[in-house]
Structures are given as C-alpha cells and as structure tokens.
Image (spheres, rainbow, N blue to C red):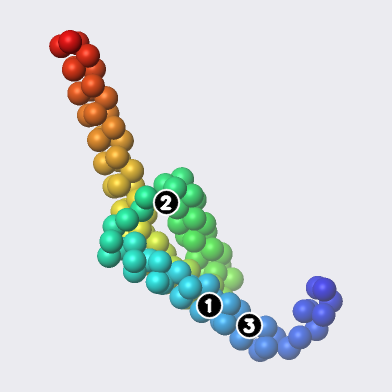
Amino acid sequence: MRGIVSRLPGAFMDNIGYIAAFLTTFAFLPQAIKTIRTRDTAGVSLLMYACMTVGIVFWLLHGIHLGDYALIGANSVTLFLALPILVIVTSNTLAEKRRLRAAAAAARQLDRSL
C-alpha cells in the first residue's frame, strides 16, 4: 500500500492532509461545545482526556518541527477546544472526590453517634 501512496503527487497528499485535519478537528467541535455549555463530564475519564490533551500538544510540536501547516492548524484548534474541557473534567472529578469524602465522613460521624 505504501508504494501506491508514495507515488501520488505531493500537492494531492497535502490536500488529503488538510481534509483530514479539518474533519478530525471539526468532528470534535459539537462534543466540545456541548461539554463546555453543560459542564457534564460524567462519561469522560480524566486520565483519557489528560493523555489525549498531552497527545495533541505533542502532535502540535511535531507539526511545528515539520513546518506542516495542516498539523499545526488542526492541533492548535483542537488544543484550544480540549483545554477548557480538561479543566472542566478535572474540576468535576475533584468535586466528586470531595463530595464522596464528605459523605463518608458524615457516615462515620453518624455511626459514632449511634
């Protein structure tokens, strides 16, 4: 398969890169808008989202190193959308842990008083 792809004209492959960058970045947009608006991250793993955001940063750095505008543009926009969601997921996760600790402390206090 590599032989077929490597024989395609460079401009054609550049266009493929821009189309891929556009589609993968803007496919993320509706979910990002929904999550930012609702702040609902119940089904989102903090570890997964942190890894994904770091991966986006690395792809952006790789694109800068290569001078690849498709990688730079797509990952800049995706990082712009991913960072607020990472903050929301982190905040929600920490708030849930605090809530659970408070509930456990209240339950222990109630057990002691009985």
Residue located 22% across and 14% down the image:
111
Q: Residues within 10 Å of mark 1 (few under 14, many from 20)?
A: few
Q: Secondary structure at mark 3?
A: helix
Does 54 appear above or below 21?
above
Would residue 57 be seen by someone viewing this image from the given angle?
yes
Residue underneath mark 2? 43
Comes first in the chain, label 2 or label 3: 3
Residue underneath mark 1? 23
Left/right of residue 18 with respect to residue 2 in the rendered view = left
Residue located 18% across and 17% down the image:
110
Q: Residues within 10 Å of mark 3 (few under 14, many from 20)?
A: few
Amino acid, disc 3:
Ile
Amino acid, disc 1:
Leu
Query: Disc 3 versus disc 1: distance between alpha carbons?
Result: 11 Å
Residue located 36% across and 53% down the image:
41
Between circles 2 and 1, the one closer to the viewer is 2
Does 70 appear above or below 42?
below
Left/right of residue 52 with respect to residue 42 in the rendered view = right
Does 85 appear above or below 9?
above
Comes first in the chain, label 2 or label 1: 1
Residue 17 screen position, x and y as percent = 60, 79
Residue 60 screen position, x and y as percent = 50, 65
Residue underneath mark 3? 16
Comes first in the chain, label 3 or label 1: 3
